[in-house]
Image (spheres, rainbow, N blue to C red):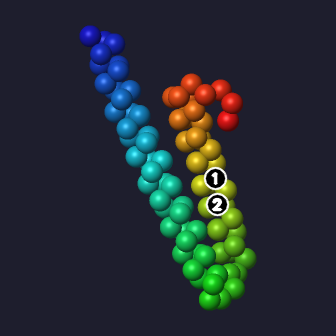
Amino acid sequence: NKIRHLRQFLRGWAKNQSGIYKVEKERLTQIINELDVKAESTLLNIFERDIKKEAEKKLQALMREEEMKWALRAKIFKI
């Protein structure tokens, strides 16, 4: 009974984490796209370039983490 409740809790937690990743990925992609569109018409200032660079770095780390999660799920050991 305790194990069943723990499994249910962990499933809910995993779905929540997955949702958080999805929302964060969409947010970072939106920031990058908006700054790309702005960069096509005008030059980005230093602050905007830093924001874009940081968003790209965070998105890349998030994608890498997601790739590792799926590799573990598929039992792939070399990425």
Quadrant in which the C terminus is drawn:
top right
Q: Give the image quarter of residue 52.
A: bottom right
Number of numbered discs visible in the structure rendering: 2
Picture residue at 65% right of the left edge, 88% below the top: 42
Name which residue lies at 34% across and 26% down.
Answer: 9
Disc 1 marks a residue whose amino acid type is Gln
Mark number displayed over residue 56: 2
Question: Mark 1 packing: few (<14 Cα in 10 Å), some, or many (20+)?
Answer: some
Marks 1 and 2, how far apart in space?
A: 6 Å
Q: Which mark is residue 38?
A: none
From the top left corner, tell me how far across and down residue 12 is, in percent.
34, 33
Q: Which sits in the foreground, 68 or 11?
A: 68
Question: Which residue is tagged 1?
Answer: 60
Q: Which element type, helix, strand or loop, lies under badge 2?
A: helix
Instruction: Please say if the residues under marks 1 and 2 sit with CB atoms less than 8 Å apart.
Output: yes
Label 2 environment density (alpha carbons within 10 Å; few <14, some 14–19, many ≥20)? some
Q: Residue furthest bottom?
A: 41
In percent of width and height, residue 63 lies at: 58, 48
Q: Is residue 19 above or below residue 52?
A: above
Position of 45 with respect to 69 (left or right) is: right
Q: Amino acid at mark 2?
A: Glu
Percent x, y of residue 37:
57, 80
